[in-house]
């Protein structure tokens, strides 16, 4: 099973941009920091631009945060790059002939919804500045 790293990659991009404000950054430079390809970085940046998290001009290497790190939450970033995709996913390919296979998904969904709500509340209370503060502490 492949796990999505879009949220962590998007946060990485935002903080990389913030920490390199004096540098004209290209998607290639950012991609090297994440060990990925520039087109993936451009796609994430386009989604974050549409969400009002960054500003950039097509063809120019100079992305900037649209808002200060203390006013951008993890929930903002999550919604920008994952839209309404839930954190936890049900296995929809269970055996319909199995009583557990049919009903476990319905039972799990109720709990997954509660977990999603708790996670989104915590993400809404966590800013990029909080992450930057932790980053700086870890450097010490």
Image (cartoon, helix red, strand yellow):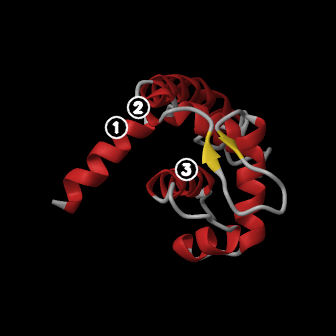
Kindly state the secondary structure of the residue where label 2 is placed. loop
Q: Compute the Cα span from label 2 to label 1.
A: 6 Å
Name of the residue lying farthest toward the front = 22
Work out how far the residue at label 3 is from the one at label 2, CA to CA, in angstroms.
Answer: 14 Å
The answer to whether residue 120 is left or right of residue 98 is: left
From the image, state whether disc 2 or disc 1 is nearer to you: 1
> What is the secondary structure assignment of the residue under circle 1?
helix
Q: Are marks 2 and 1 in contact (CB under 8 Å)?
A: yes
Left or right, 124 with respect to 76, comes to left
Q: For numbered disc 3, what is the local secondary structure?
A: helix
Q: In which quarter of the image is the N terminus?
A: bottom right
First-in-chain label (1 vs 3): 3
| Depth check, front residue: 118 or 1 | 118
**Dot 2 corresponds to which residue?**
126
Residue 14 seen in the current view: yes
- Residue 114 in percent (x, y) is at 52, 22
User: Label 1 crowding class (10 Å Cα cut-off): few <14, some 14-19, many 20+?
Assistant: some
The residue drawn where x is 74% and y is 49% is 56
In the drawing, what numbered circle is on residue 14?
3
| Residue at image coords 73%, 36% | 83
Residue 13 versus residue 84: which sits nearer the camera?
13
- Name the spot of residue 112 as percent of width and height, x first: 56, 31
Mark 3 Cα shell of 10 Å, populated few (<14), some (14-19), many (≥20):
many
Q: Is residue 76 above or below residue 94?
A: above
Please tell me which residue lies in front, 7 or 69: 69
Residue 65 percent coordinates (x, y): 59, 42
Q: Mark 1 points at which residue?
A: 130
Q: Where is residue 35 in the image (x, y as percent from the top left)?
A: 57, 77
Q: In this view of the protein, which residue sits in the foreground, 66 or 105? A: 66
Q: Quadrant of the C terminus?
A: bottom left
Most extreme residue toward the left, as rendered?
140
Q: In the displayed structure, would residue 59 be above or below residue 136? A: below
């Amino acid at each position: 099973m492949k796990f999505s790293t879009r949220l962590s990659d998007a946060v990485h991009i935002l903080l990389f941009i913030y920490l390199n404000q004096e540098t004209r950054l290209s998607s290639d430079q950012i991609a090297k920091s994440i060990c990925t390809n520039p087109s993936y970085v451009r796609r994430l940046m386009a989604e974050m631009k549409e969400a009002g998290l960054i500003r950039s001009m097509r063809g120019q290497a100079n992305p900037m945060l649209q808002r200060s790190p203390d006013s951008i939450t993890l929930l903002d970033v999550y919604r920008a790059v994952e839209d309404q995709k839930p954190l936890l996913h049900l296995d929809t390919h269970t055996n319909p002939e199995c009583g557990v296979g049919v009903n476990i998904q319905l039972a799990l969904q109720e709990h997954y919804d509660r977990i999603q709500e708790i996670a989104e509340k915590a993400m809404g209370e966590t800013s990029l500045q909080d992450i930057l503060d932790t980053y700086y502490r870890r450097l010490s």
